């Protein structure tokens, strides 16, 4: 039993730390070799990055984010497979990953909507669950132009589909907790949208930041 708890603690530490690391920070160092936090509107929204670097650059950033989310979940599955509970390890790592994304210790516990983390976590639990979450979260985000609304919709669908397709009470509880915390964290966005203070996704090109560069 002690060994089981040690594996859970190691999984929690790794997954939370990975979730706390900014995707832009990783991409700045290993992919684009420049500080991406100080370009354009100086925010970390994916749509802003796409407007500045185009779809090719945005796909590179997306690849970095997928790798950052997948690695700790796979590690969690490998560690808990020692005790014969790889599925629990992946689900628990997904929960801790989302915690890190929503409350990152490296950014004063101020995180993002965690839409991508939620989708990746659901895929690693069950394929049909992941597909349902991805279709709804991304579809609603594109339609509404609000990532937070997509995260809320994806979380609600995740909880519903989990009840229908996920076996095992512990596994089901972990998945529902993961989706639930995403749902609760993004609810304040509804008030910001009503007050017209929530930033919307944009698909317009923006090259204005280039004029700030030194030639």
Image (spheres, rainbow, N blue to C red):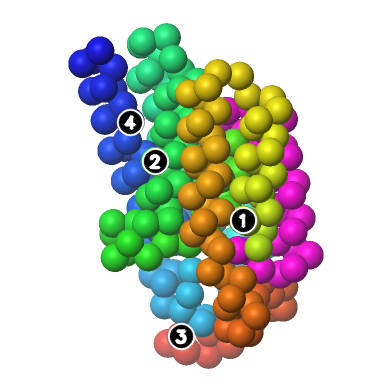
Horizontal arrangement in the rendering, residue 96 relative to residue 211 (left or right): left
Eyeballing the image, is 197 above or below 27?
below
User: For residue 3: magenta?
Assistant: no
What residue is shown with label 1?
151
Image x and y of residue 81, in percent: 41, 14
Image x and y of residue 72, in percent: 41, 35
User: For residue 135: magenta?
Assistant: yes
| Residue 142: image tag | none
Q: Residue furthest left?
A: 2
The alpha-carbon separation of the residues under discs 3 and 4 comes to 42 Å
Secondary structure, mark 1, is helix
Judge the density around disc 3: few (<14), some (14-19), many (≥20) Cα neighbours within 10 Å.
Answer: few
| Residue 213: image tag | 3
Along the polypeptide, which appears first: circle 1 or circle 4? Answer: 4
Along the polypeptide, which appears first: circle 1 or circle 2? Answer: 2
What residue is shown with label 2?
96
Horizontal arrangement in the rendering, residue 68 relative to residue 63 (left or right): left
| Labels 4 and 2 touching (C-beta < 8 A) | yes
The image quadrant where one finds the C terminus is bottom left
Q: Residue at x 25, y 12 (%)?
A: 1
Q: Which residues are magenta?
A: 123-148
Q: Residue at x 44, y 15 (%)?
A: 85
What residue is shown with label 4?
11
Magenta: main secondary structure: helix
Along the polypeptide, which appears first: circle 1 or circle 3? Answer: 1
Secondary structure, mark 2, is helix
Judge the density around disc 2: few (<14), some (14-19), many (≥20) Cα neighbours within 10 Å.
Answer: many
Judge the density around disc 4: few (<14), some (14-19), many (≥20) Cα neighbours within 10 Å.
Answer: many
């Amino acid at each position: 039993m002690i060994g089981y708890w040690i594996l859970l603690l190691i999984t929690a530490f790794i997954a939370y730390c990975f979730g706390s690391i900014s995707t832009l920070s990783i991409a700045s160092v290993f992919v684009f070799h420049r500080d991406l936090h100080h370009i354009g509107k100086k925010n970390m929204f994916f749509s802003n990055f796409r407007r500045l670097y185009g779809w090719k650059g945005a796909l590179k950033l997306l690849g970095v984010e997928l790798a950052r989310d997948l690695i700790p979940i796979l590690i969690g599955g490998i560690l808990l497979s020692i005790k014969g509970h790889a599925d629990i390890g992946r689900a628990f790592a997904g929960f801790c990953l989302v915690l890190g994304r929503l409350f990152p210790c490296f950014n004063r516990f101020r995180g993002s909507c965690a839409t991508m983390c939620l989708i990746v976590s659901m895929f690693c639990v069950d394929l049909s669950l992941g597909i349902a979450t991805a279709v709804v979260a991304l579809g609603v985000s594109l339609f509404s132009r609000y990532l937070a609304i997509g995260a809320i919709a994806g979380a609600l669908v995740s909880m519903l589909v989990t009840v229908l397709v996920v076996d095992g009470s512990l596994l089901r509880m972990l998945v529902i907790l993961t989706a639930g915390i995403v749902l609760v964290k993004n609810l304040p966005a509804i008030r910001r949208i009503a007050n017209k203070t929530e930033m919307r996704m944009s698909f317009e090109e923006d090259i204005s930041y280039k004029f700030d560069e030194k030639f």
